[in-house]
Amino acid sequence: MAGKPVIGVLALQGAIQLHRPHIEAAGGEYLPVRTAGDFERADAFILPGGESTTMLKLIDAFGLEETMRKAFAEKPVWGICAGAILLAETVRNPEQKSFGLLPITVTRNAYGRQLESIQQEIGGYPVSYIRAPVIEAVGPDVEVLAEREGQPVWVRRGSAMASTFHPELTLRYPSPMHRTFADLARSPLPGSKPAGPH
């Protein structure tokens, strides 16, 4: 869609409101999403950082899984930290159910406690890692947009994007990642397909 995309942030648990100024500065409209109707209104979705196991329990409790699978098959989605885990095809440490939208292998909490809060600059923009997962492997059609010490930290395939860091914690609006996602929401790329259960 052209113009001002409505970007929904999954508002069940995690870092939600911090995305608002980034989305608005990138020319989008912020929408917290909690219901099937919210998912219909949004043009694209952010799965925020938080606790992926808790998010899965709440998604199940609210009966949102099928609504979300359908939405992610049709519209752009960006998973951040815990959200990246939810989008991964393979999750380790421990194994966990996911939407399987991105052909990547993610290991939870792989950096350990020493990276509970550490920063890196990506293109001159500081981002934060907080008990971040590690992307151990990517499929051949996955574009790596940024790395840290040789490992992917920001990836994309078609209309699906994932990052293991938090750009929303930096108070310079918008982050380059939010700007990229807002552009994707305006002109979604082909490539996101429905995923089976994982």
Image (tube, rainbow, N blue to C red):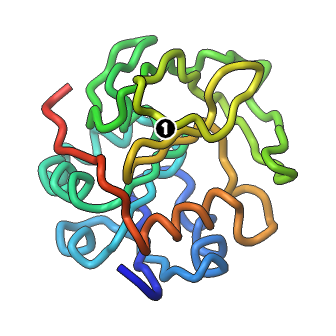
Looking at the picture, how far across and down is residue 185, in whole percent? 42, 69
Query: In which quarter of the view is residue 116 placed?
Result: top right
Of all residues shown, which one is farthest toward the bottom?
3
Task: Using the image as rendered, state which of residue 117 and residue 193 is in the foreground.
Answer: 193
- Closer to the camera, 12 or 72? 72
How many C-alpha atoms fall within 10 Å of the one at disc 1: few (<14), some, or many (≥20)?
many
Instruction: Using residue 141 as the reference point, say whether residue 100 is left or right of it.
Output: left
Report the front residue among 27 and 117: 27
> Which picture quadrant has residue 77?
bottom left
Q: Residue at x 48, y 82 (%)?
A: 29
The answer to whether residue 104 is above or below residue 121 is above
Is residue 53 among the parts visible in the rendering? no
In the rendered image, residue 59, in percent from the top left (x then y), is placed at 25, 47
Query: Which residue matches tag 1?
Result: 82
Report x, y in % for residue 92. Answer: 42, 13
Q: Is any atom of residue 79 visible in this view?
A: yes
Q: Residue at x 52, y 80 (%)?
A: 28
How many numbered circles does the render carry?
A: 1
Secondary structure beneath disc 1?
helix
Q: Which residue is drawn at the image coordinates 32% and 26% (left, top)?
A: 89
User: Which residue is painted at 66% across and 21% down in the image?
Assistant: 151
| Amino acid type of the residue that numbered disc 1 sits on in the rendered structure | Ala
Quarter of the image where the N terminus is located: bottom left
| Residue 154: percent from left, percent from top | 60, 39
Can you say which quadrant of the picture contains the C terminus? top left
Describe residue 157's horizontal placement relative to residue 181 as left or right. left
In this rendering, the answer to whether 184 lies above or below 161 is: below
